Image (spheres, rainbow, N blue to C red):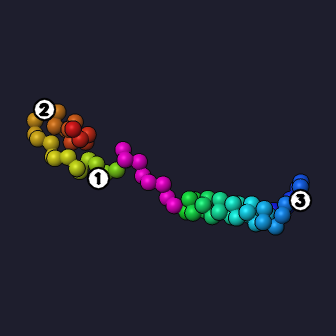
Amino acid sequence: MIRVVRGNPTPEELAAALAVVRARAAATAAQEGAAPPPPQWSDPARIARSRSPLPGPRAWARSFWPV
């Protein structure tokens, strides 16, 4: 509930203030429902983008971090 504490707003001023408050509440509600995108560093697809490591010394190290 919204209450006017000071002053005597006109009906137009009160309607404008209420429109701003309702728009802000709708934007906040829409933002809370959306899940944040996952961080790129934890995306398993980024590892699969690079070519397979060639056999040889330290091939195990190249198998996880793309070059």
Mark 3, residue position: 8
Q: In this image, 29 relative to 10: left or right?
A: left
| Residue type beneath disc 1 | Ala
Q: Earlier in the sequence, mark 1 or mark 2?
A: 1
Give the residue type that dot 3 points to: Asn
Contact between labelled residues 3 and 1, with CB atoms less than 8 Å apart: no
* Label 3 neighbour load within 10 Å: few <14, some 14-19, many 20+: few
Label count reads: 3
Closer mark to the observer between disc 1 and disc 3: 3
Between the C-alphas of marks 2 and 3, the distance is 80 Å
Quarter of the image holding residue 53?
top left
Q: Residue at x 36, y 44 (%)?
A: 41
Q: Is residue 1 visible?
A: no
Where is mark 1, residue-wise? 45
- The answer to the question of whether label 2 and label 3 lie on touching residues, with beta carbons closer than 8 A, is no
Name which of mark 2 and mark 3 comes first in the sequence. Answer: 3
Q: CA distance from mark 1 to mark 3?
A: 60 Å
Task: Tell me: residue 35, above or below residue 53.
Answer: below
Range of magenta residues: 34-42
Q: Secondary structure at mark 2?
A: loop
Residue 10, x across and y down, in percent: 84, 64
Q: Tell us which disc is closer to us: 1 or 2.
A: 1
Camera-nearest residue between 13 and 17: 13
Q: Amino acid at mark 2?
A: Pro
Q: What label does residue 23 carry, if any? A: none
Which residue is depicted at the point 44% across and 54% down?
Answer: 37
Query: Magenta span: helix, strand or loop, mainly?
Result: loop
Q: Residues within 10 Å of mark 1 (few under 14, many from 20)?
A: few
